Amino acid sequence: MYKFSKKLKTLSFALMIAGFVGIVWGFMNAPSTVEQAKEIVAKSHDSHGSGHGEATTHADEKSGHGEVKVDDHASEASHGEEGHSAAHDEHVFHQLQNRPWSALYVAIFFFMMLALGTLAFYAIQQVAQAGWSIVLFRVMEGITAYLPVGAVILFVFLVLSGMHMNHVFAWMDPALVDPTSPKYDHLLDAKKSYLNVPFFLIRAVIYIAGWIWYRQYARKRTLALDNAQEGDIKQYKKLFGASAAFLVFYLVSESMMSWDWLMSIDHHWFSTLYGWYIFAGMFVSGITTIALITIYLKSRGYMEYVNDSHLHDLAKFMFGFSVFWTYLWFSQFMLIWYADIPEEVTYYAQRFDEIKGLFLGMIVMNFIFPVLVLMNSDYKRLPWFIVMAGIVVLIGHYIDVYILITPGSVGEHWKFISPEVIGSALFFLGLFIFVVFTALTKAPLKVKGNPFMKESEQFHY
Amino acid sequence: MSSKVIQAMYNDDDVLMSAVKETKSAHHHIEEVYTPFPVHGLDKAMGLAPTRIAITAFMYGLCGLSFAIWMTNYMMIQDWPQDIGGKPSFAWIYNMPAFVPIMFEMTVFFAAHLMVITFYMRSRLWPFKEAENPDPRTTDDMFVMEVAVEGNEKELTSFLKKTGAVEIKVTEKH
């Protein structure tokens, strides 16, 4: 049995406290009036030393007055300078108000995604009846223990957004689908039957309930298998069936989840392979987390039966799925870049104009770095190499999630190195460590009763 | 100069593997093993040096990548600048995303083909070369281990019999 070490527990609480301070700072410093927002923008422009062109964001504004411009150009011109700049100020005000919320959402989603990616990996191992990975099942179950916590927190966040506590999801603004409103957005109105708050929340409940159900069911089955008589594989067969059914549900729900929770933030934009792209990032991050926690437990003297062939396989998955993620990222990027259709390309144009450093840096971290570091077969067996690559990959995918969310919710006033972004990450990292390692203490670190256990113990490549 | 070798035949790869390990630990010199299909872990059991083909593959891949960059730049930018889809062709970097598939394919093409050629050269294989395997059955269902005869031939023969060989032949090797 694993014992949650005092040091690690203290660390997790320290992270949560430090993170909480950062989050509170973010909310305290968010503007509560348009005037304060103007002040913040003026200040940040001064400190940047150069004025961002005021006009740059207007092409793809979320609040819909970009649409008005196209539909009714004459009336927009007659609004005059004053009316327009007031609307702009309010827009910036909402964006700045979104900053702490958006930072929170990135962290909530990212750590939920680690658990969900691991759950998918776990289900695949069950369905494939893989021999090698059985000794790692308890680590995966420990990580997925975060899923009920993380997914419920995420749901609470979505409910708060639905109650207009924040404007991360700009489409939730009822004025946008009100034909009498000056902000009326007919494109969004056409999507109303899918993108509306009640249906959005109902869908979220369905996805989350399905995932949590499988997680709890699988956990119960493997615990029952631990106590089953030798040769009794009834529980094992039940788990096999449930895992296969879950994978079908997961592939559909994951894809729809990515449209709902991420793609809808840029609600005029759509991409058909978005779901796969999110899946790839989720999967590689989940596998990396499994590798990191396994190496940690091994370094603490647990799991002596995990040999370097197991680590080698995990590192191969990290390598392979990093390439797979890049493949999907690039497929999405290149088609949109090549076709250069305005309604599509604004998505990348905005990211390229406003957040270029992170946008390109993330590709280096998620592709070039793992490819070069993990290419050599011998390096895949060195724990410190896997840890180094793993940390970079996880930070890279954190930035990826940040770039998926922030340009749509905050726009050009993003700030990555800021107390609220780092605080949110630290808080949920602390919570993640606390929940995962608490779950690891609840059951022996090695499952019993799996018919392929011997193969996993003797796994040698 | 020719030397005497014993060819021990096996009909199962697991038996062969344990025979190789036993022969190794009895300090007999294994000259070569012929198998109809790749046997996992045989190279380690025989004590062969690890292959360096991975390093060559990496270098060939880099050559392919460089070649693709040079080729796309020469064809599409320098020699006959082409405006496709309104993409500016003033510099290679502006069109780089369009060239990524070519860069990828060239990397794979160079790595794969040059690796095969390297492998043939290192293995001394070329078209119409006469087969080196001592028994045609090694391409069907038999495994042959060749052990150099040093000292007592009879003792070695009985030792190999014990390791599970189904047939033993003593021949001169050139």
Image (cartoon, rainbow, N blue to C red):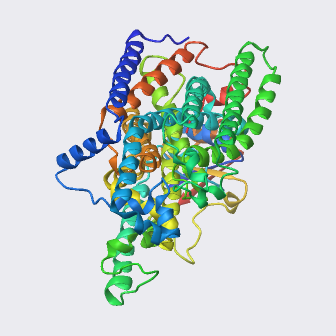
Residue B26 shows in the view: no
As drawn, is A408 to the left or to the right of A206? left
Residue A97 screen position, x and y as percent: 39, 38
User: Which residue is pictured at 44% across the width and 64% down the height?
Assistant: B122
| Residue A250 found in image quarter | top right
Counting the numbered discs, the total is 0
Residue A412 shows in the view: yes
As drawn, is A202 to the left or to the right of A342? right
Name above or below for residue A65 compared with residue B152.
Answer: below
| Residue A395 found in image quarter | top left
* Closest to the observer, A112 or A440: A112
Residue A170 screen position, x and y as percent: 51, 47
* Closest to the observer, A245 or A346: A346
Residue A4 screen position, x and y as percent: 47, 12
User: Which residue is pictured at 73% across the width and 37% down the height?
Assistant: A246
Which quarter of the figure is the N terminus of chain A placed in? Answer: top right
User: Which residue is pictured at 74% across the width and 16% down the height?
Assistant: A224
Most distant residue in the bottom direction: B80
Name above or below for residue A309 compared with residue A67.
Answer: above
Which quarter of the figure is the C terminus of chain A placed in? Answer: top right
* Closest to the observer, A218 or A345: A345
Residue B93 screen position, x and y as percent: 33, 71
